[in-house]
Amino acid sequence: MRVNIVNIKAIKVAALEHVNELETLDQSMAFFRAWQKDSGCLPTTPTRMFGVALSDPDVRPIESFRFAICSEIDTDIAENSFGVMNRKISAGRCAKVRHIGSRDTLQLKVNDLKRSWLPSREEVKRDNPIFFEYLNFMPEVSENRLLTDIYFPLR
């Protein structure tokens, strides 16, 4: 696994928090896309899309999984009936790993970072959530060609 240490700037995002089983995340993503279309925030040019893990899927009750679906914005969004809100992905040092393939297996790479890579280096996780940047989407590419960057916050 190739890990790069990067320093990221704060990223202003529109975020929809998903609180439910991991298996229903696709429904929340569709709801977020509906907000983008309804609000006029549906990007006409490619925008950066993120997922922020607000809870650890290994530690929580399955029905209270928390995950924020986000898109980068340059201005604040108005209060809305969809529950999409202004948020920020914090600046700082991160371990960055590129994942190629199904997003269903992202957790395996996160676990490898946490359980193998982190202890083998003299690094400590920062008290910020792990986040993902989605670089492409289906159906534009096949599932085995999906690209996702995993950002693991470090002190």
Image: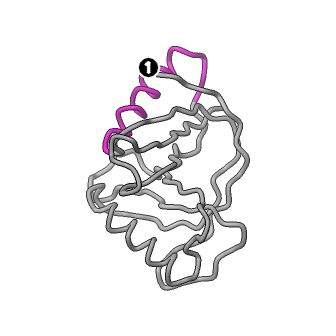
In this picture, residue 37 sits left or right of residue 145? right
Magenta segment, prevailing SS (helix, strand or loop): helix
Q: Is residue 116 magenta?
A: yes
Where's residue 113, x and y in %?
46, 27
Query: 154 or 137: which is nearer to us?
Result: 137
Q: Quadrant of the C terminus?
A: top right
- Tell me if residue 55 comes above or below residue 17 in the rendering: above
Q: Mark 1 points at which residue?
A: 116
Is disc 1 placed on a helix, strand or loop?
helix
Tell how many labels: 1
Please state the extent of the stretch shown in magenta in the rendering: 104-124
In this picture, residue 109 sits left or right of residue 122? left
Q: Residue at x 43, y 54 (%)?
A: 137
Q: Residue at x 48, y 59 (%)?
A: 68
For badge 1, the amino acid type reads Ser
Query: 68 or 147: which is nearer to us?
Result: 147
Q: Quadrant of residue 115?
A: top left
Q: Residue at x 51, y 14 (%)?
A: 120
- Tell me if residue 52 comes above or below residue 42 in the rendering: above
Q: Which residue is drawn at 62% across and 33% down?
A: 154
Query: 117 or 32: which is nearer to us?
Result: 32
Q: Is residue 28 magenta?
A: no
In this picture, residue 133 sits left or right of residue 67? right
- Tell me if residue 113 comes above or below residue 128 in the rendering: above
Question: How many other residues sit within 10 Å of disc 1, few (<14), some (14-19) or many (≥20)?
Answer: few
Where's residue 108, x and y in %?
35, 33
